[in-house]
Structures are given as structure tokens and as C-alpha cells.
Image (cartoon, rainbow, N blue to C red):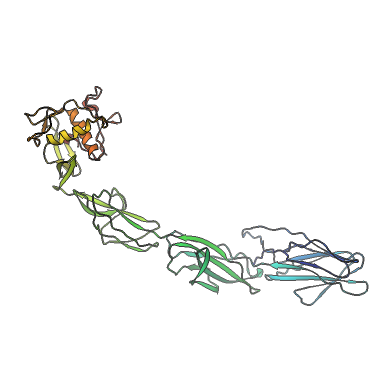
Amino acid sequence: MPKKRAAARQCAIVGAWCFLLILVLAVTGCPDPVSLSDDVVRDIDHDLADPGDVEPSGVDPFHTRPGWTWSGDPVDGTGVFRFRFNGSEWNTLVGEPGGTYTYSFEDLGWDIFPGTYLFEVQERNSAGNWSLSCSCTTVIQVRPPVFITVPDDPTNNRTPAFEWGQYAPAQYGATNLFSYRLQRLESGTWQTIPGDRDVDTTVTSYVVVSSLTPGTYRFGVSELNQGGSRSAYVYHEFVFQPATVTYHGNGHTSGSPPRDTNAYGMGDEVTVRDIGSLVRQGYTFSRWNTAPDGSGTSYLPGETFAIGLESVVLYAQWEHTVGERVSHDAGGVVFHLRIAPAATFPTGWDDTATGTVDTPFLIGETEVTYELWYTVRTWAEDPANGYVFLSPGQEGSHGVPGASPTAGRYEPVTNVSWRDVIVWLNALSEYSGFTPVYWYQNEIVRDAEEPELIDWDAIVREQTDGFRLPSNL
């Protein structure tokens, strides 16, 4: 298994005479030279290169064939050395006094198992005595398994799947025995989830079995090496954020949409709620849909569907209730409309043309009463509202133009022009909280006396919800 070069923790320099020990791989950080006696000076140096983070491309950044280089004492040394690892039996090397020597597993063609190695060297002097040991500690680390891959990782996946492998074959210390664990971040500390862990298994994939709750998680994998120790865990961190289902009234006039407080993981079953207390005056609820305009997927109450990768909003879909009365209030004057079915109607000054309305629509039960006209006109002519009329209108056929309503207030308004009517309808729309229908040069038509406004230049904005004349449906 590939191993990482580690730092030398110490370098003891003692003895009866001097030699230089240089660790060339997997060791760093030896102290400065130490003077031990009048005739003994031992130096340990280092010459290391950190391979850094190397991806698995045939290059092994975890060196498993370290080497050590040292120099003998040119004055009292004989060039005869002995060395050992971790207190084992001594090995002898015979050279020349003052020479430089290397012992390397690379030269031997051997890989050593991950672990901590204490390398010691002594030199015999001319009197036949061995110096005290010069030692350096080398740590060979287990190379971690290959980075974890996540085939599918949506934020609301309650059972995410993970796969992993290894960087290098068995000659680098790998055993293909992995340990894995799932942890949850709680109050700043990672806590292992007992049901999602295993030790020394040969599997290389896993699907989480615990029922995840909202929070931050990480999944880690470690590998056992042939020396009996494990690599550091490699982690993949992820956030579990369940999906939600929200109901939208989509134009309702009273009541509240139903609430679904469940937290859904991917694939969980959703049972569609009933309408609850939702009401839209003049309409009948028909279904729920994933788009406000009904162009998405429709569901009836009681139906089920599997939640996907994202949260879902269901919009109420309404159908006009033909014949139902819809009431409005303008300054205390109540007026009524009825829902009429889609139909084709005669149009034009002599009813010889036709116009088709494709959907049900609201139309006044009666002609506009003088009382309603007077109330809205009075509000509209306030300077703050900015409406101007050609004629103030009158009560029926015998009323006084512009006068306050009398006992005949329910008679229709008369003696008004087409321009007065479209200005008044815009005023009624604004007064009632709707968007006016009639616009001219991108402005709401408010002045019936505007000289440049001629009948056919008035623009009807079809997508507004205000009041209009039947001939403009």
C-alpha cells in the first residue's frame, strides 16, 4: 500500500567520536549539531523532498523503501559500522574511514510495512570500541484508500450510496480489508452512527441503512495494512436536507391551504391533501397542480406520488361555477355579478359580427346603477386620484346630471359617453383593488377629455383582472 513520508521526531547524537548521519527519505526535522565531549561531535542532517498530494497515476507518494546516508569519523573512525532497526540484531557494514555510506531499501528492492522505525548506527574506533548510537526515527504511513465516490448524492437522499477502492496493490502493504463508518455532526463533534459501520470487511460499496434526519454527515473509509495498523479515514461530507410539500391557494379568497409538515427523503410516498378550508368566491376547486397555471402535473386529493430530488409546491386549480353570484363593495355600495359560461356573442353596432369568449366570465347582474356610478366617480374625481370625465352622468331618464342619488338611485346611469365609461371602469378597478384594463401609450386611461385619445387607440390589456365592457371581452 502506498505510504507517506513522515517527519523524524528526534536525532540522538552521542558517542566517543564523530560521524554524519543523513536520512534521505521519509525523515525530516533533525536538530542542529550537538557537541558531546572534547573529542566527540556528531551531526545529523536531512535532505528530504515532500511529494505533496499526488493522485493515483502510477506514482506512489507514500515511500515504502526508505534509505539512510551517513559519514564516518575521519579522525578516530575505522570505517566499520553496525546498524539496526527497532532494537533488532546488529548488521555490519565495512568501509573506509571517513567515507559516506547509504543503506537503502530501494537498492534492496524491498518494501517495508507501514510503521515507526528507529534506525541506529555505530562506528568502531581504533581501540575496538563501538560508539554510542546515532539514531533517527522514520515513520512510514499507510496510504489511504482511493477517494470515495458518490454515485448519487441529492440533498434529500435518505439512503445515499458510496463506493471506494485502493491506490496500490498488496506489495505496498494493502490488505483489501476496509473499515467504514457514518458520522453525524452534533454540537461541533462528529458522532458515529452505530448502525452504519463495519470493521475489516472486503466490501467496496455501501448504502446507508439508518433513517437520516436533517443535518450534516460524513462517510469515512480506512484500510488495514499488513503491519496491523489502519490508514487515516478518508471522508465524504454531505448535508441531508429533506424535501417538503407545500400547498398554495392560488387566488383563494378565504380559508387557509392545508399544511404538510412531513420531511420527505427521495422516493418517499406523498399522499395529496384535501382542500381543507380553502374557498375562492365564484369558483369550484378541481385539483392540485405543480404549476400555478395548471401546466404541470395534476393530483387529486388522496392520490399518492413519490417525492423526487426537490421540494414540491402544489397549486390549487379552480374552475368557474357557472351561475354563481359574486358580490363586490365599492364605498358601501354593493353590486353583484354572475358567472356566465363560455359562449359566442353578437358584437358590433348592429350585432352583425360575433365574438367568442373561451372561458367562463363574470358579468353584472344589472346595468350599472346611478348610485354605483356616482360613488365611484366622486372618488375618482378627487385630485389625489386624477380622473376626469366629459359628463357626470344622470339618474335614469329624468335625473339631474351630476346630482346626488335620490330614491331612483337604482336606475341605470345615463347620458355618458364611451370615453366616460372606460375611464369610470378603470376607476372602479382601482377602487376595488384590481388592475385597470384600459391603457393608452402605456399609461392608465384616466382623462376622458384627452384630445389625442380616440376610440380605437384605447388599448385593452387582456391579462389584467379589472372591469371592462362586454364588447371588449
- Looking at the image, is 347 positioned above or below residue 130? above
Q: Is residue 124 left or right of residue 380?
A: right
- Which of the 4 image quarters holds residue 47? bottom right
Residue 291 screen position, x and y as percent: 31, 50
| Number of numbered tags placed on the structure image | 0
**What residue is shown at x 70% (from left), y 58% (from top)?**
50
Of the 4 image quadrants, the one containing the C terminus is: top left
Q: Nearer the viewer, residue 189 or 161?
A: 189
**What residue is shown at x 76% (from left), y 68% (from top)?**
108
Of the 4 image quadrants, the one containing the N terminus is: bottom right
Q: Nearer the viewer, residue 240 or 409?
A: 409
- Which of the 4 image quarters holds residue 174? bottom right
Q: Nearer the viewer, residue 353 or 120?
A: 120
Residue 309 screen position, x and y as percent: 40, 57
Work out whether residue 199 can be spotted: yes
Work out whether residue 152 can be spotted: no
**What residue is shown at x 39% (from left), y 59% (from top)?**
243
Residue 76 screen position, x and y as percent: 92, 68
Q: Is residue 391 left or right of residue 219?
A: left
- Looking at the image, is 456 positioned above or below residue 87? above
